[in-house]
Image (cartoon, rainbow, N blue to C red):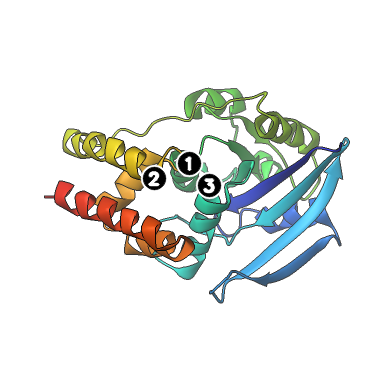
Amino acid sequence: MTEQYTVALAGNPNTGKSTLFNSLTGMRQHTGNWAGKTVLTAEGHFNHEGTTYKMVDLPGTYSLYSNSADEEAARDYIIFEKPDVTLVVLDATSLERNLNLALQVMEMTNRVVVCINLMDEAKRLGVKIDIDAIEKKLGVPAVAISARHRTGIDQMMEKIRGVASGKIVPAPLLVQYSEDIEEKIAALEPIIREKLGTSFPTRWIALRLLDGDESLINSMRSRWNSPVADTVKGVVSYGHTACH
């Protein structure tokens, strides 16, 4: 039986994300709108070395903090659809700015591969990037590519398949917050785990509750039936209490 995996494609605008998507899927793609939103979605399929992939091109965003419909759509797909891999595309010439999104995705899921694109442009500008050091620091597979020239694609697919199949188990860098916030996270996580189980990233949900992310709460309620929605309401109430 042919292996099939789903890959979510995340990244800031202008990182070459769509170029990579088009290069991999070619004519085997279609577009539409995210459910209940005016945000466009693109989905395509391709085969690589006997494995079939569905690739979902998420909206280009600078963060996943639900400040826009694009951010909400990208966030909800990663959290609720649980792709086998989220491929985060970074611009090799603007790594510092782009890493913010990568760190946010890594708080949501450990099934991450970091793809540093536009290496041809970085080379032209004299920018040198130590991929091994980035991989070690972030705790997730990293690869350098040029989507425009299709270089590094095989190495990228090897790492995607490794994570999707479970042969590679990333251990993402854990962002540490202030002592006060960490104490509140520690208090919230057991409650979230008890109420919602282990299907969702408890630390990330705790952070969003502490931040008062009403958009996430509404998304959770809209996807589940009344009893579960009531459970979410209980977790939210506890989260609000923990904030004070």
- The picture places residue 6, in percent across and down from the top left corner, at 69, 46
Q: Which residue is mark 3?
A: 94
Residue 14 screen position, x and y as percent? 60, 58
Identity of the residue drawn at 71% across and 43% down: 120
Residue occupying image coordinates x 65% and y 66%: 41
Q: Is residue 173 left or right of residue 169?
A: left
Quadrant of the image occupied by residue 215: bottom left
Characterize the local packing of mark 3: few (<14), some (14-19) or many (20 or more) Cα atoms within 10 angstroms.
Answer: few
- Discs 1, 2 touching: Cβ within 8 Å: yes
Which residue, given by chain and number where applicable, does mark 1 sit on?
199
Q: Earlier in the sequence, mark 1 or mark 3?
A: 3
Q: Residues within 10 Å of mark 2 (few under 14, many from 20)?
A: some
Label 1: few (<14), some (14–19) or many (≥20) C-alpha neighbours in 10 Å: few
| Residue that protrudes farthest toward the left in the picture | 244
C-alpha gap between disc 1 and disc 2: 7 Å
Cα–Cα span, label 1 and label 3 = 34 Å
Give coordinates of residue 200: x percent, y percent: 45, 43
Mark before the other along the chain sequence, 2 or 3? 3
In 3D space, how far apart are the residues under numbered discs 2 and 3 (Cα atoms)? Answer: 37 Å
Q: Is residue 190 at least partly visible in the picture? A: yes
Residue designated by label 2: 196
**Residue at x-position 88% and y-position 36%:** 50
Quadrant assignment for the N terminus:
top right
**Helix or strand or loop: what does disc 3 sit on?**
loop
